Image (cartoon, rainbow, N blue to C red):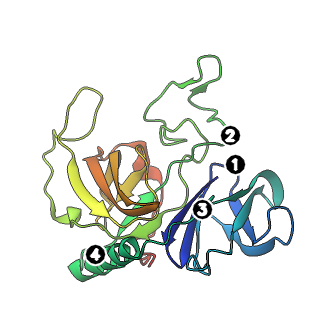
């Protein structure tokens, strides 16, 4: 579990746990008093919008449980942010970045966050070599993990990639070196290489690089390097509801 201040009134908690859904708890004490913040979470993160980092006398502790078919199969925590620097400048820049993205009026995009843990894919994962046999496996999306991506998250980025015309020979493959498309997005959800981005036209892009822009403990924004995926890539088999609205 990892905890980051998302602003002076928000905390971002992410985890690598097995589970189809997750429940998160919070307390101001390390071993007792945990109250349920949310349940049936389908993403590997949660944004706690009810914190007050202006108050240096409060410490927040979090615990997360993972569930399959209503049965708890994993848990993490309690964990805390050891200290929280009050940075009003970072807080202002985070807010202004989100406003700027909104003012750009680009169509939303949808991030498919890769599962980092879970049941090995029965179709392509080799337990002896601990490698996947089929990089374009239609069962797991080439992740090696069953149901290889979490449910999509709607967000905004600084470019309208749906208007870009990509040459037919410019798609990602192991034999081709591409110049990635570069764009930036807000501080959260926190993204990682091998996550996938879907545009409003259902074009899919692999995230091949993430450069964080930070100040103090705060992630201000994320600069993404994106490479388009071929239409036959297994990532296209993951359903995405493109009517979702971005998280604010």
- Residue nearer the viewer, 135 or 22: 22
Residue under numbered circle 4: 101
**Which residue is at 55% across, 46% downward?**
148
Residue under numbered circle 3: 83
**Which residue is at 30% across, 45% downward?**
229
Image position, residue 16 (x, y; %):
63, 48
Q: CA distance from mark 3 to mark 1?
A: 28 Å
Residue under numbered circle 2: 119
Q: Give the foreground label among 4 and 2.
A: 4
- Marks 3 and 2, the one that precedes in the sequence: 3
Q: CA distance from mark 4 to mark 2?
A: 37 Å
**Vertical comparison of 139 with 123: above or below:** below
**Which residue is at 29% across, 43% downward?**
230
Q: Is 141 displayed left or right of 165 in the figure?
A: right
- Marks 1 and 4, the one that precedes in the sequence: 1
Labels in figure, total: 4
Q: Give the foreground label among 3 and 1.
A: 3
Mark 4 lies on a secondary structure that is helix
Q: Is 244 displayed left or right of 123 in the figure?
A: left
**Which mark, by number, is residue 18?**
1
Image position, residue 189 (x, y; %):
46, 63
Q: CA distance from mark 3 to mark 4?
A: 30 Å
**Which residue is at 28% across, 61% downward?**
184
**Vertical comparison of 142 with 11: above or below:** above
């Amino acid at each position: 579990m990892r905890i980051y201040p998302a602003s002076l009134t928000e905390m971002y908690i992410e985890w690598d746990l097995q589970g189809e859904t997750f429940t998160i708890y919070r307390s101001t004490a390390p071993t007792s008093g945990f109250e349920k913040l949310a349940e049936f979470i389908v993403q590997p993160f949660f944004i706690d919008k009810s914190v007050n980092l202006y108050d240096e006398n409060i410490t927040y502790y979090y615990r997360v449980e993972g569930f399959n078919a209503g049965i708890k199969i994993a848990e993490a925590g309690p964990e805390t942010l050891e200290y929280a620097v009050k940075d009003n400048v970072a807080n202002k820049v985070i807010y202004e970045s989100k406003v700027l993205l909104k003012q750009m009026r680009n169509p939303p995009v949808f991030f498919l966050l890769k599962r980092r843990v879970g049941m090995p894919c029965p179709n392509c994962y080799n337990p002896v070599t601990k490698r996947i046999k089929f990089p374009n496996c239609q069962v797991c999306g080439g992740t090696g993990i069953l149901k290889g991506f979490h449910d999509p998250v709607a967000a905004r980025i600084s470019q309208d990639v749906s208007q870009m015309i990509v040459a037919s020979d410019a798609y990602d493959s192991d034999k081709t070196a591409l110049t990635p498309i570069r764009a930036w997005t807000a501080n959260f959800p926190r993204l990682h290489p091998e996550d996938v981005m879907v545009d409003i036209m259902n074009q899919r892009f692999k995230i091949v690089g993430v450069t964080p822009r930070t100040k103090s403990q705060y992630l201000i924004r994320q600069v993404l390097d994106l490479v388009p995926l071929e239409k036959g890539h297994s990532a296209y088999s993951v359903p995405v509801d493109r009517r979702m609205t971005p998280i604010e």
